[in-house]
Image (cartoon, rainbow, N blue to C red):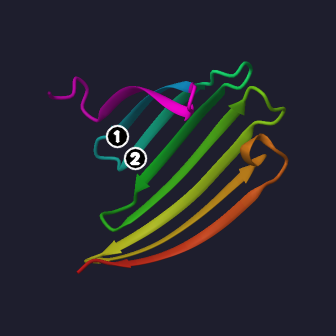
Amino acid sequence: MPNLVEGLNIGAGLASDQAAEDTENDIETMYITYAFDGLGVSVGAQSTDINVQAATSDIERMAYGISYAVNENLSLGYGVSTTEYEALANDEESKGIGASYTSGGMKLGVIHNKKDNLNGGTNDMEMTELQLTFAF
């Protein structure tokens, strides 16, 4: 089926996760992305809700991202998300940036991600990764 608006994608999903033998959590997710024709820019957002059977234990996550294809070889991206844990005092806040350069069958990339209040706690996490891949 063709897109009603060129470059626009919208989707949703429902699932159920059996967390324990007698516990089933309901999951709902929705997303929207849009690619600006001719500009090399794409934006997106996603919302996910996990309705946990245990009282006051629901989890809600909202994420946003943008990417820019500088040219056919170089791409840049940035994303942020917030995860709210109903049973915890802190929200997990994440952000990340990445870049990749592709030439033939080789890709060179770098990403840097940072999380504050990991899993709703008080710990933070930060990582940087350099990637080099070859396709044969």
Left or right, 62 with reference to 17: right
Residue 73 in the image: state x and y as whole percent: 33, 68
CB within 8 Å, label 2 to label 1:
yes
Left or right, 125 with reference to 107: right
Residue that badge 2 annotates: 41
* The image quarter in which residue 81 lies: top right
Residue 83 in the image: state x and y as whole percent: 67, 36
Residue 71 in the image: state x and y as whole percent: 34, 63
Extreme residue toward the left, this view: 1
Mark 1: which secondary structure?
Answer: strand
* Residue shown at the point (78%, 46%) measured from the top left: 117
Asked if the stretch drawn in magenta spans residue 6, the answer is yes
Q: Relative to 126, does residue 80 appear above or below in the rendering?
A: above
* Residue shown at the point (56%, 47%) measured from the top left: 79
**Identity, as a three-letter code, of the amino acid under mark 1:** Ala
Asked if the stretch drawn in magenta spans residue 46, the answer is no
**Identity, as a three-letter code, of the amino acid under mark 2:** Val
